[in-house]
Amino acid sequence: MRGVGLQRRLVRSWPFCPLSAITIQMITTEQALKIILDSVKPSAEVEWPPLAEALGATLAQDALSDIDIPPFHRVTVDGYAVIASDGPGQYPVVEDVPAGHYPKVMIRPGEVSKVMTGAPLPEGADAVIAVEKTGGFADVGRMARIDEPISQGKNISRQGEDLKAGQTALARGAVIGPAQAAVLASVGVDPCPIFRRPRVAVLATGDELVDCQRKPGPGQIRNSNGPSTMALIKSAGVTGVNLGTAGDSEAALEEKIRQGMESDFLIVSGGVSAGDRDLVPAVLARCGYRTLFHKVAVKPGKPTLFGVSAAGRHVFGLPGNPVSSMVIFELFILPALMRFQGAPHQAMAVEARLEASFKRKDAQRQEYLPVRMSWEEGGFLARTIDYHGSGHFIALTQANGLIMIPMGVTSLPKGSVVSARFTLGRIAPAQ
């Protein structure tokens, strides 16, 4: 951890020392993530959005069930409610009970009721036989034929077997996904108490950038980092504020950065390296951000910067290359956003076999490569794609994951097992 110690000594002197006088040591991805998670504090503020708008948020209170679930003995198949001990035979149908209607007739020995999936079990019945094991449905007053014996309790969900009234349906701290939304809806939690989600501002920098609606002139390119970062933020269930672009001038940068300081997180792409026009670190310092690290031993994304303001708001400075921005979002920004909401974040890391061999010359950094992942022969297979480096964002449209090549590894033979992760918001194309 010597790199982290050096880093902390350097950043204490940052506001009083010009950028050119500081040499900041690279730290590992593990060290960088620890600094981020130590710095970002979970929000204690609670919001109450409609349940339909709470996807991806973190539940701020235990959700207690106000009813038994199921609220009655529930039929789980279309068929006949029977007394199991009656056995096979022909029995009169005394009632038709569709879902949403409560039975009115008690079943006595030698009788059955026609029931639909989701209907309450008629009183007196102790099993339901699927219609496929009968002579078919018969109307009320006619005879139903039961072809097979059935055991007591078959095809019934008992009242309260999932939850009893007053029990905790979902604990505080749960991240709300589709399954959690179903549980919350079932116990009447709408609106829903959640920890406040972070507000994130996004700024792309560089004289070469123009809005995507404009056709670039000589030496210009369209701003792709802004829309891609906004899309990643939205995929994480977080609100983004698009600050647009700023040119390579301290005045233009400062104006936009001060706007971004009103948000919990500011993401700035471009202008964070060591060139004459890389003005972002100095402007961030002037605006009151303290740099906690600047340079990570990762490829792509080496110049990544992370800082905090006196008000406890954070900034990420990302390289301008689009793939770098997306990789760093996966590694660092998404965990920070989850941390703010009080939710644990674990990447969807799996083991995968390489379809082809891999070689590289420089092994001084941990490297992430876009791949197409598929399940084949009992495991994940990672296929490398045509990839020209961190500026080749079109390659990501062919990828649904990243593989990690550790520091010090220069080559891997075909079939090697590597660590891989599925990436947020990206879907593998059909083959």
Image (tube, rainbow, N blue to C red):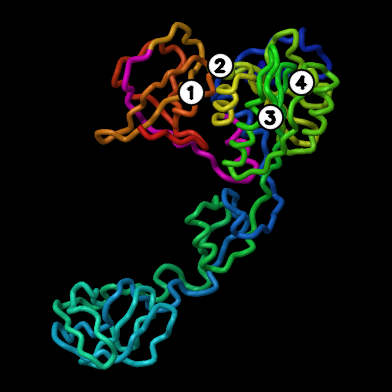
Amino acid type for the residue under numbered disc 1: Ala
Magenta region includes residue 335: yes
Residue in the picture at 56% in, 16% down: 297
Do callouts 4 and 3 mark residues in contact (Cβ within 8 Å)?
Answer: no
At numbered mark 1, what does the secondary structure look like: helix, strand or loop? helix
Quarter of the image where one finds residue 100: bottom left
Q: Residues within 10 Å of mark 2 (few under 14, many from 20)?
A: many
Q: Are circles 1 and 2 on residues that touch, CB within 8 Å? A: no
Label 4 or label 2, whichever comes before in sequence order = 4
Q: CA distance from mark 4 to mark 2?
A: 22 Å
Give how far across and how far down residue 301 sits, in percent. Answer: 58, 19
How much space separates mark 1 and mark 4, taking CA atoms? 40 Å
- Measuring from the top left, give residue 305's x and y in whole percent: 67, 22
Q: Identify residue for label 4.
A: 12
Q: Quadrant of residue 149?
A: bottom left
Mark 2 lies on a secondary structure that is loop
Q: Which residue is mark 1?
A: 395
Identify the amino acid type marked 2.
Answer: Ala
Q: Type of residue at label 3?
A: Gln
Q: Which residue is mark 3?
A: 213
10 Å crowding of disc 1: few (<14), some (14-19), many (20+): some
Query: Residue 286: image x %, image y %?
Result: 83, 22
Along the polypeptide, which appears first: circle 4 or circle 3? Answer: 4
> Residues at badges 3 and 2 in contact (C-beta under 8 Å)?
no
